C-alpha cells in the first residue's frame, strides 16, 4: 500500500482564490483558452455594428452548434430580446454582455460545493463512462482536497480493469494518498473495506472509484447500485456525494448520461472534463436548463480545461459564461 500524507484538522480554506490572485488569474486564462473552440463562433458575431434579425439568426445557429440545445437557445434569445428592449441596448458589445448575463443567470443554480464538513469521513462515489476522465478527475480532486488540508483515502472500486487500479495507484502516489485495492476483488467489498479503513484512520474524505460503464449496460448499472448500497451499509448515509464525470466533448449525449446515472444512483453533482478539446461547451447550459425545468438543479462541482493537477477547478457561472461568449 502507498503511504498516506497526513494533514491536520485545519478548517477548509476558501474554495476559490481572490479574483486578483495569480492563481485565479491563471485559471481564468486557462478557462478562456480552453473554451476558445466554443467561443470563436459566438464572440465573432458581436464584432459588427448592427443589432438586427441577421444577428439573432447567426447567434441561434452558433448556440445550437455549441450544443446549447434548440429549446434552451430559444429561451435564451427570447430573454435577450426582452433585455435589449427593456434596457435600450444599442451596440453589439452591449448585447454580448447581456447574453453573458443571461447565461450566467441560467447557470447560477448549478453552482455548488461539496459539503465536506457534513460527515467524517465524507464519502464520495464517482461514476462515469470509460474515457470520460473519471480516474484522472479523482486524482485531481484528491490534489485539490489535499491543498485544502483534507486527508484523503482512495478506493479502487474499478475492479474490472487492472489498468484502472494501476492508474489510481499512480495518482495516489503523486498525491501522497493511500489507495485501498484488491487484486481481484468484488467492487462492493473493496468500497466496504475502504469505508472501514477511513473510519479507523480518521480520514476526512474517502473517494470511491467505480468501473466505467455505459448507461445502456443494465447489469453494470445494477452493480453501481450495489456499490452504493455497500457504502451505506458500511456507513449509514454514505455516499454523501454521488458524482458523475462527464466528457465535455460528448455534447448532447451528456444529457442522456446524466439522466441514466441519476436514475441509478441519485447524482448530487457533476464534473465536466475536456472542455479544452471541444467546440460544444454550451452543453452545460443545456444540462442546467433541463434540470431547471425538472426543478432539480444539479451542481457542476468542478470543470476541467487541461491536463495539469490544477486544471480541475470549482465551477463559477459568471466566469464560465464570460469565457464562453468572449466577455470579461
Image (spheres, rainbow, N blue to C red):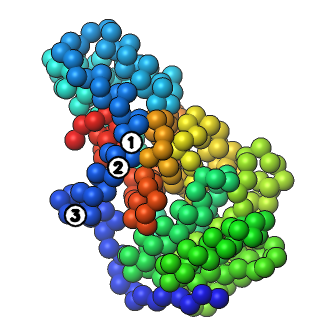
Q: CA distance from mark 2 to mark 1?
A: 6 Å
The answer to whether the residue labelled 2 contacts the one labelled 1, judged by CB atoms less than 8 Å apart, is yes
For mark 2, does the 10 Å Cα neighbourhood hold few (<14), some (14 to 19), or many (20 or more) residues?
A: many
Name above or below for residue 205 compared with residue 89. Answer: below
* Residue 218 in view, yes or no: yes
Residue that appears at 54% across and 41% down:
249
| Chain-order first, disc 3 or disc 2 | 3
Q: Which mark is residue 35?
A: 1
Q: Position of residue 213 (x, y in %)?
A: 73, 53
- For the residues labelled 3 and 1, say whether their Cβ atoms are less than 8 Å apart: no
Q: Which mark is residue 31?
A: 2
Residue 87 lies in quadrant: top left
Secondary structure, mark 2, is helix
- Picture coordinates of residue 222 (x, y %)? 80, 56
Q: Nearer the viewer, residue 210 or 293?
A: 210
- Splitting the image into 4 quarters, where does residue 24 fall? bottom left
Residue drawn at (71%, 68%) of the image: 163
Which quarter of the figure has residue 74? top left
Report the quarter where the N terminus lies. Answer: bottom right
From the viewer's perspective, tell me whether residue 237 is left or right of residue 27.
right
- In the visual, does 108 lie left or right of 300? left
Is 47 or 189 nearer to us in this picture?
Answer: 47
- Expressed as whole percent of the image width and height from the top left, the position of residue 44 reads 29, 25
Residue in view at x 25 percent, y 28 percent: 96
Q: What is the crowding at mark 1: few (fewer than 14 residues within 10 Å), some, or many (at least 20)?
A: many
The label on residue 22 is: 3
Amino acid at each position: 500500500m502507498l503511504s498516506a500524507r497526513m494533514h491536520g484538522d485545519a478548517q477548509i480554506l476558501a474554495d476559490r482564490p481572490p479574483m486578483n490572485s495569480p492563481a485565479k488569474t491563471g485559471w481564468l486564462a486557462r478557462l478562456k483558452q480552453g473554451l476558445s473552440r466554443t467561443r470563436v463562433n459566438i464572440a465573432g458575431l458581436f464584432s459588427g455594428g448592427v443589432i438586427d434579425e441577421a444577428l439573432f439568426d447567426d447567434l441561434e445557429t452558433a448556440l445550437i452548434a455549441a450544443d446549447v440545445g434548440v429549446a434552451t437557445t430559444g429561451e435564451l434569445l427570447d430573454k435577450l430580446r426582452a433585455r435589449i428592449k427593456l434596457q435600450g441596448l444599442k451596440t453589439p458589445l452591449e448585447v454580448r454582455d447581456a447574453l453573458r448575463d443571461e447565461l450566467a443567470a441560467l447557470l447560477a443554480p448549478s453552482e455548488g460545493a461539496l459539503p465536506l464538513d457534513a460527515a467524517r469521513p465524507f464519502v464520495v462515489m464517482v461514476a462515469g463512462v470509460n474515457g470520460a476522465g473519471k480516474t484522472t478527475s479523482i486524482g485531481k480532486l484528491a490534489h485539490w482536497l489535499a491543498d485544502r488540508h483534507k486527508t484523503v483515502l482512495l478506493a479502487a472500486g474499478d475492479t474490472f480493469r487492472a489498468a484502472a487500479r494501476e492508474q489510481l495507484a499512480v495518482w495516489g502516489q503523486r498525491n501522497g494518498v493511500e489507495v485501498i485495492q484488491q487484486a481481484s476483488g468484488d467492487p462492493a467489498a473493496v468500497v466496504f473495506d475502504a469505508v472501514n479503513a477511513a473510519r479507523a484512520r480518521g480520514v476526512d474524505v474517502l473517494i470511491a472509484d467505480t468501473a466505467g460503464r455505459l448507461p445502456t449496460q443494465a447489469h453494470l448499472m445494477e452493480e453501481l447500485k450495489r456499490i452504493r448500497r455497500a457504502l451505506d451499509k458500511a456507513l449509514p448515509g454514505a455516499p454523501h456525494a454521488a458524482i458523475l464525470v462527464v466528457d465535455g466533448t460528448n455534447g448532447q449525449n451528456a444529457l442522456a448520461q446524466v439522466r441514466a446515472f441519476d436514475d441509478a444512483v441519485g447524482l448530487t453533482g457533476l464534473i465536466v472534463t475536456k472542455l479544452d478539446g471541444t467546440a460544444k461547451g454550451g452543453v452545460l447550459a443545456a444540462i442546467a436548463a433541463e434540470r431547471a425545468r425538472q426543478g432539480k438543479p444539479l451542481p457542476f462541482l468542478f470543470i476541467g480545461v487541461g491536463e495539469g493537477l490544477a486544471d480541475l477547478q470549482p465551477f463559477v457561472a459568471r466566469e464560465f459564461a464570460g469565457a464562453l461568449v468572449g466577455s470579461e
